[in-house]
Amino acid sequence: MVKLYLASESRNRQQALKLARIPFTAIPARINEKVITDANIKRRVVKIAKAKVMAVKSKVKGLILGADGVNLQGKHILEKPQNRADAIRMLQIQSGKICSFLTGYYLLNTFTGKTYS
């Protein structure tokens, strides 16, 4: 059986896989997400997910899943808060409003080289 590796330290992503009863091993993908840019936010989250996969692909063999997400509120793109003040600012922007969450995924099969995003 091919093993699944999650290129992430995200507790939320790990919990989602656990709830789905999908066995996996989490491997931290320590990348600088800020240097990955794209004017199109949909492409950007996939680029970041791919960068996470590429950061760990030399360490394991199997399926490697990377993901990145952003919260969208009108014209605001809300990423991970940098500190408490940033978190409060984001909550104020979202307060009483409907938000959307956009997640980009990238999956690599290291045995075949096939990718999915």
Image: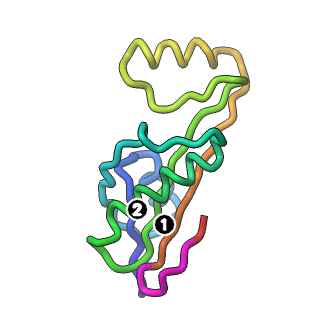
* Spot occupied by residue 54 in the image (x, y as percentages of width and height): 39, 63
Looking at numbered disc 2 in the image, what kind of residue is underneath it?
Leu
**Residue on which the image places disc 2:** 6
The main secondary structure of the magenta stretch is loop
Q: Residue at (58%, 52%) from the top-left corner? A: 104
Q: Residue at (52%, 41%) from the top-left corner? A: 37
Kind of element beneath mark 1? loop
- Asked if 13 appears above or below 81 in the picture, the reply is below
Whole-number angstrom distance, CA of label 1 to CA of label 2: 14 Å
- Could you say which disc has been placed on residue 85 in the image? none
- Give the number of callouts: 2
**Colour pattern:** rainbow
* Spot occupied by residue 103 in the image (x, y as percentages of width and height): 59, 48
- Asked if 104 appears above or below 78 in the picture, the reply is below
* Spot occupied by residue 42 in the image (x, y as percentages of width and height): 65, 46
Q: Residue at (60%, 33%) from the top-left corner? A: 71
Kind of element beneath mark 2? strand
Q: Quadrant of residue 33?
A: top left
